[in-house]
Amino acid sequence: MFEIDGRPYRGAVELRVMPAGIAVINEVGIEDYLRGVVGAEISSLSPLETLRAQAVIARTYAVANRGKHGKDGFDLCAREHCQAYGGVKAERPVIDGAVRDTRGIIMISDGVPISTLYHATCGGMTSDNEKVFGGSPTSYLRRVKCPFCKAGTNYRWRREIRASAILARLREEGYAASRLWRVQLDSPAPLDRVDRLTFFTDRGPIPIKGTTFRRWFDLPSTTFQLARATPTARPAPARQPLAAATPARSHASHAAPSKLSPPSGSHPQPGTELRSPSQGYALPRPRLTTLPEPTPTALVVQSGAGLVRARRPPGGWMVLALAAAAPEQPATDAASRSGPLASPATPSRGEPLPPPLDASGTQDLVLDRESGDPIIPLLGRGYGHQVGLCQAGAVELGRRQWSYRQILAFYYSNVALRRLQY
């Protein structure tokens, strides 16, 4: 064992003079190497079966990528470019046990070690490898529906990008645009991967790759959609149509406006339209209202598909329109009878997100009410490239007593396990 900058490492050390300086190379056996990798890639507080799955992933990666830095005189780097390697400081007894329990086990497909891609949080659905990285489809890196990562980092996220920041980036790329008023997303579906954004400017439409846009603004992922404005925003320049009702916001960073009293002695009559400040449209105080107490547990909601019955969300209702209640009917799924509700849900952990304002993925910019700056509000899902294993989902599956073999089989299609002899 030796130390470099106060960090202990197992094995031996070699100093090699390179064109860029002196390279410090740690020569270590693969099982000891994994003890310093697993703890650097996932929390040691994760369930044991999840740690075992991560150990198999890390081992498979090391075997499949041995010699990746051969031209530099070593096999793998210690950064995320390969795998994060923390040496002895990243070791924990539970991780040592996970590595020991899976000693020599790797995943193979067609007789060779697979490319064990993984990410922090998929947000409900992983991605096909070719949709993210290009190239040919890989049989074991197929899209998987993952309802297990709701507690993961950035399962749902929200960002507001200022037009001035976008224009500055465009100028850096050589586009001499000075005004931006509309954006269009090229995406297969709402909350799916954005392949391209088109910005409509005074210099004409400018297309930018979704991956480039993510890098510009350090977004958690490229799976996002255009969103409705927050309470501090207003439309710019034209108003977009509103849904007929929306649940009150409960997310701490997007709190709903304070409860206001209705006009004296009155409640809204059927068909009365009350626009919601939570959507960024301020109205004269006399037109605002609250529901009578106790708040009903169901309302008839005017959606784009017609009148539908909707249950009261946990955060309560912000009323836009009321209609006379229909006669009681057996409980059914409102969406299956009349199409999906056109009301957005709070963008908080574990809850669905609204569809874009425009089905085509096109939206005018809105103005931030405080600064007056044009902004593009986004709602997204997931953290990382979303290909392969979802670590947040794997943690939940471990809590549900899935074995590491079951976890790996869920995220990697048509693979087999093989034990190396060494």
Image (cartoon, helix red, strand yellow):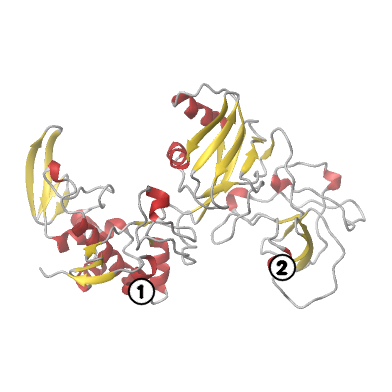
Would residue 278 appear left or right of 168 to someone viewing this image?
Answer: right
Q: Position of residue 122 (x, y in %)?
A: 45, 58
Q: Quadrant of the C terminus?
A: bottom left
Q: Is residue 19 above or below residue 413?
A: above
Q: Position of residue 301 (x, y in %)?
A: 78, 61
Q: Residue at x 57, y 56 (%)?
A: 348
Which circle marks residue 334 in the picture?
A: 2
Q: Residue at x 38, y 54 (%)?
A: 129
Q: Quadrant of residue 345?
A: bottom right
Query: Which residue is tagged 1?
Result: 406
Q: Position of residue 266 (x, y in %)?
A: 91, 56
Which circle marks residue 109 in the picture?
A: none
The answer for how far apart the CA atoms under marks 1 and 2 are is 35 Å
Looking at marks 1 and 2 on the same chain, the residue that comes earlier in the sequence is marked by 2
Q: Is residue 309 above or below residue 261?
A: below
Q: Quadrant of residue 178?
A: top right
Q: Position of residue 12 (x, y in %)?
A: 7, 53
Q: Quadrant of residue 281?
A: top right
Would residue 310 appear left or right of 43 to someone viewing this image?
Answer: right
